[in-house]
């Protein structure tokens, strides 16, 4: 029942967010100088050609009418047509979004899988070498530009060692598994195609490492401080006094509690990863939203940019909803408050 | 202290991951297969419809996929700007130069096996004009195409148009299979944006957006079977990554590498960095309508203040040459007797003093559409400061900047120009005719009634010697009045694996490869 309430409230909120975001992006994209019709017409177009294109695109209609048409489109899943690729934005997003999501998820899993143990170790062995190492790693992670780290990894693992591919999502000579989820790793498994799966794994390692590295530090630091707080609590001392082994105290008692605030960090991290994937994708020729959006921005392709913004805001709100629900699952106190 | 031990399970998982990591490591370094040419491009194509695309990045795919009535000639492995028949076996013009009749070559087929006939030619040009976007601009308006017999087609122009044959070799003049009209009810526009329907040596096999585009041979192609079985384009946004893949041999040709990367590649084993003189020019627009640039002396002063040699040495690493008037080296009609400005600060100051324009402020627009524009803007700002002109640099999104050209809301700006067809018309009528003010080509908003007259006469004449004379006159006016700052012609530089053979560079076909004639 409580869950349903939260979901209902959040979905209402979601509708408001979509209206707000669409209004802001629409206003911005129509207020900044730059005529999309001219862009479509090409370099040497005469004014007549530009005028005809403006009419075709409905750009000569009054702004409120254009917005109304756009909003109606969003509701029915139509985000307009990209000026650059000349395809429906929804189609383009369907094509590129799963690639970015897949990369972001794998990066998040990597960051968590490495960051949580490091954070725990750093809290347990506070001010010992491992703690210094983790702190150094966290600072490096946050301050290393993704494009630089990415290039370094490519030079090393592709250029010098020849161990991993230098970019792309899958070897172009391998037939792709049929698209079901758009996540290549999952689609390959569903099709039982081990060759495609291996190739996809090999292609995702370096970009996911690059993208995940930034958040590894964040996760490790977050876990470290949460763990330190928990380890000073009375129940930890009591548990130890009662004869529980230190390992049990750390992993069974303290860690689950330390993880609660970290769920928020991870949820926010996923949002960050979606945006942050842009640079990583460019370096690794990863066919995701990154290159698509950057190219769209440079070309003033406002239907594409607006479509991206709306979808990402949507995803952001959904992730937050998921985080809140997760909170209620792992922390009974929150459940009772709601 | 507790001891954290690795469980056997963790160890196994690690070992498995490691084996996935290294297995097939040889594949990562395997060179591109011998029957495939792999080209690394920085950006995905946008539209493959020849009636829509104005972008060489798309033409890499469309040019070898379609045939046109005319094609550029090749002599001893060198691409020329003169044209000869491609689908056209023979052609003739009526005496008044208004009607052109083309006889089509037999045995040419689209990739579905249907014949390329006069109906297809008519369909393609009618469609080009119906759609009416950028590519239709290369031909004059009011062209009427008539089917004379199944293999003969005639074009009726409303007025003579000297560059007509040249314009027929342009990407937009591609002959399209009329069956596309059945594919989508918008004249095949939606279909052709991401499919091909031509009679060239290749056809589109697949397009994984943002990743790869693959061409395969057209099984019904009327010419010789090509040696290369597949052309694959892979999209790699980052220049360093393109270079690395070229060095590793995964890529045969890497496009758009910056000068420093090319420099580093020169002399490397297995890599050939090629330099070709191109017709791509870089110049500065000066808004002739706006004070103080409406005064020719100010424009001359600017032309004397710019450090041409410094720009070519510093920005192009010496891989280019200074322009001499508007028409680039390699294009007929160029007259080298006109003035070529060179750096002369004293003269510049004197001219500026005459014009009483010292200390004037001029807005200078540029964008990052070309990485060279920013250094050019900064260098020009420093050059002009020396003579007492104050440039206010404004960096804009390219589309925004183009709009400002069209409304004339700027002082100076950077620009590049590549001809669509091999005729001096591209560098004169477009740049100086007062009918084309703004984005259409006359970006300096230059106005001179005498020049207008000369240009219109030259465009109507079909006598080349006569036209050369007229263009020589034009060049005198526009260099003396310093309509633009004529900066430089940039060499086209491209890095390939050194086993790639048979590539013919044509200055009219940048980023376009004669794959059917290539091998490795």
Image: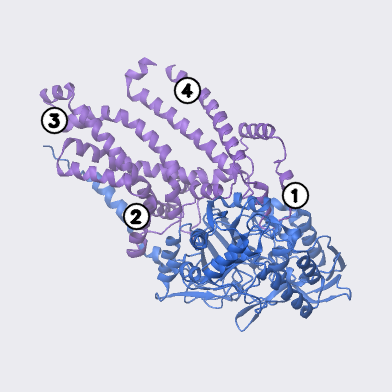
Chain colours: A purple, B blue
Residue occupied by mark 1: B186
Which class describes the residues within 10 Å of circle 4: few (<14), some (14-19), or many (20+)?
some
Chain containing the residue with disc 4 = A
Q: Quadrant of residue B64?
A: bottom right
- The quadrant in which the C terminus of chain A is found is top left
| Disc sitting over residue A7 in the figure | 4
Q: CA distance from mark 2 to mark 1?
A: 49 Å
Chain containing the residue with disc 3 = A
Residue B437: % across, % down? 71, 57
Please state which of the two labelled residues, at mark 2 or mark 4, is closer to the viewer. Answer: 4
Is disc 2 placed on a helix, strand or loop? helix
Q: Residue at x 63, y 58 (%)?
A: B293
Q: Residue at x 47, y 22 (%)?
A: A7
Q: Quadrant of residue B277?
A: bottom right
Residue B207: % across, % down? 57, 56
- Seen as rendered, the residue at the extreme bottom is B76
Is disc 3 placed on a helix, strand or loop? loop
Residue A53: % across, % down? 72, 48
Which class describes the residues within 10 Å of circle 1: few (<14), some (14-19), or many (20+)?
few
């Amino acid at each position: 029942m409580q869950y349903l309430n939260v979901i209902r409230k959040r979905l209402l909120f979601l509708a408001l967010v979509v209206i707000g975001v669409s209004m802001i992006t629409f206003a911005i994209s129509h207020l900044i100088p730059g005529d999309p019709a001219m862009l479509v017409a090409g370099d040497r177009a005469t004014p007549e050609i530009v005028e005809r294109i403006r009419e075709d695109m409905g750009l000569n209609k009054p702004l409120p009418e254009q917005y109304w048409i756009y909003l109606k489109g969003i509701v029915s899943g139509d985000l307009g047509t990209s000026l650059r690729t000349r395809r429906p934005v929804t189609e383009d997003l369907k094509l590129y979004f799963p690639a970015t999501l897949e990369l972001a998820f794998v990066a998040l899993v990597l960051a968590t899988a490495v960051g949580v143990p490091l954070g725990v170790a750093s809290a347990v062995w506070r001010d010992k070498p491992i703690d210094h190492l983790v702190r150094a790693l966290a600072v490096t992670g946050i301050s290393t530009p993704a494009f630089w780290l990415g290039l370094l990894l490519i030079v090393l693992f592709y250029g010098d060692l020849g161990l991993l591919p230098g970019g792309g999502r899958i070897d172009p000579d391998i037939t792709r598994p049929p698209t079901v989820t758009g996540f290549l790793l999952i689609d390959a498994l569903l099709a039982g195609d081990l060759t495609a799966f291996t190739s996809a794994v090999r292609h995702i390692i370096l970009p996911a490492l690059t993208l995940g590295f930034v958040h590894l530090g964040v996760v490790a630091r977050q876990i470290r401080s949460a763990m330190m707080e928990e380890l000073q609590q009375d129940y930890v001392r009591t548990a130890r006094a009662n004869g529980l082994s230190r390992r049990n105290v750390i992993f069974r008692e303290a860690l689950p509690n330390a993880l609660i605030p970290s769920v928020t960090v991870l949820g926010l991290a996923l949002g960050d990863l979606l945006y942050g994937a842009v640079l990583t994708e460019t370096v690794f020729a990863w066919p995701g939203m990154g290159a698509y959006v950057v190219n769209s921005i440079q070309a003033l392709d406002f239907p594409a940019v607006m479509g991206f913004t709306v979808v990402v805001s949507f995803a952001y709100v959904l992730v937050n909803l998921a985080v809140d629900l997760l909170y209620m699952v792992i922390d009974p106190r929150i459940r009772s408050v709601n | 202290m507790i001891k954290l031990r690795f469980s056997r399970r963790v160890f196994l998982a690690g070992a498995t991951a490691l084996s996935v990591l290294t297995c097939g490591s040889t594949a990562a370094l395997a060179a591109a297969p011998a029957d495939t040419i792999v080209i690394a491009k920085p950006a995905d194509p946008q539209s493959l419809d020849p009636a829509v695309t104005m972008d060489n990045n798309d033409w890499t795919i469309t040019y070898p996929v379609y045939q046109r009535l005319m094609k550029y000639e090749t002599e001893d492995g060198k691409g020329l700007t003169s044209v000869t028949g491609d689908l056209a076996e023979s052609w003739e013009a009526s005496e008044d130069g208004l009607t052109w009749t083309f006889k089509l070559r037999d045995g040419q087929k689209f990739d579905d096996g249907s014949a390329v006939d006069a109906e297809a030619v008519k369909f393609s040009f009618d469609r080009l004009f119906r759609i009416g976007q950028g590519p239709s601009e290369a031909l004059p308006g009011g062209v009427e195409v008539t089917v004379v017999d199944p293999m003969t087609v005639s074009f009726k122009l409303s007025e003579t148009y000297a560059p007509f044959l040249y314009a027929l070799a342009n990407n937009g003049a591609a002959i399209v299979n009329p069956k596309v009209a059945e594919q989508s009810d918008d004249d095949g526009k939606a279909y052709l944006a991401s499919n091909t329907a031509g009679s060239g040596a290749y056809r589109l096999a697949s397009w994984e957006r943002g990743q790869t585009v693959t061409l395969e041979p057209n099984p019904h192609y009327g010419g010789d079977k090509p040696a290369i079985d597949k052309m694959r384009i892979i999209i790699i946004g980052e220049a360093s990554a393109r270079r690395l893949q070229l060095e590793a041999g995964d890529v045969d040709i890497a496009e758009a590498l910056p000068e420093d990367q090319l420099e580093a590649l020169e002399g490397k084993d297995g890599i050939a960095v090629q330099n070709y003189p191109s017709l791509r020019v870089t110049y500065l627009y000066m808004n002739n309508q706006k004070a103080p640039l409406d005064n020719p002396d100010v424009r001359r002063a600017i032309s004397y203040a710019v450090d041409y040699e410094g720009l070519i040495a510093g920005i192009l690493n010496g891989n280019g040459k200074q322009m001499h008037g508007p028409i680039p080296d390699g294009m007929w009609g160029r007259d080298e007797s006109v003035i070529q400005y060179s750096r002369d600060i004293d003269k510049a100051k004197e001219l500026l003093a005459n014009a009483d324009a010292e200390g004037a402020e001029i807005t200078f627009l540029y964008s990052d559409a070309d990485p060279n524009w920013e250094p050019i803007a900064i260098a020009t700002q420093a050059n002009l400061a020396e003579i007492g002109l104050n440039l206010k640099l404004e960096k804009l999104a390219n589309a925004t900047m183009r709009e400002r050209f069209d409304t004339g809301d700027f002082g100076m700006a950077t620009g590049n120009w590549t001809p669509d067809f091999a005729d001096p018309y591209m560098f004169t009528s477009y740049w100086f005719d007062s009918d084309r003010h703004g984005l259409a080509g006359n970006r300096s908003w230059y106005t001179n009634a005498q020049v207008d007259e000369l240009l219109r006469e030259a465009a109507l004449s079909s006598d080349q010697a006569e036209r050369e004379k007229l263009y020589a006159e034009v060049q005198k006016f526009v260099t003396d009045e310093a309509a633009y700052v004529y900066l430089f012609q940039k060499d086209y530089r491209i890095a390939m694996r050194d086993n790639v053979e048979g590539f013919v560079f044509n200055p009219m076909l940048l980023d376009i490869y004669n794959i059917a004639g290539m091998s490795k």
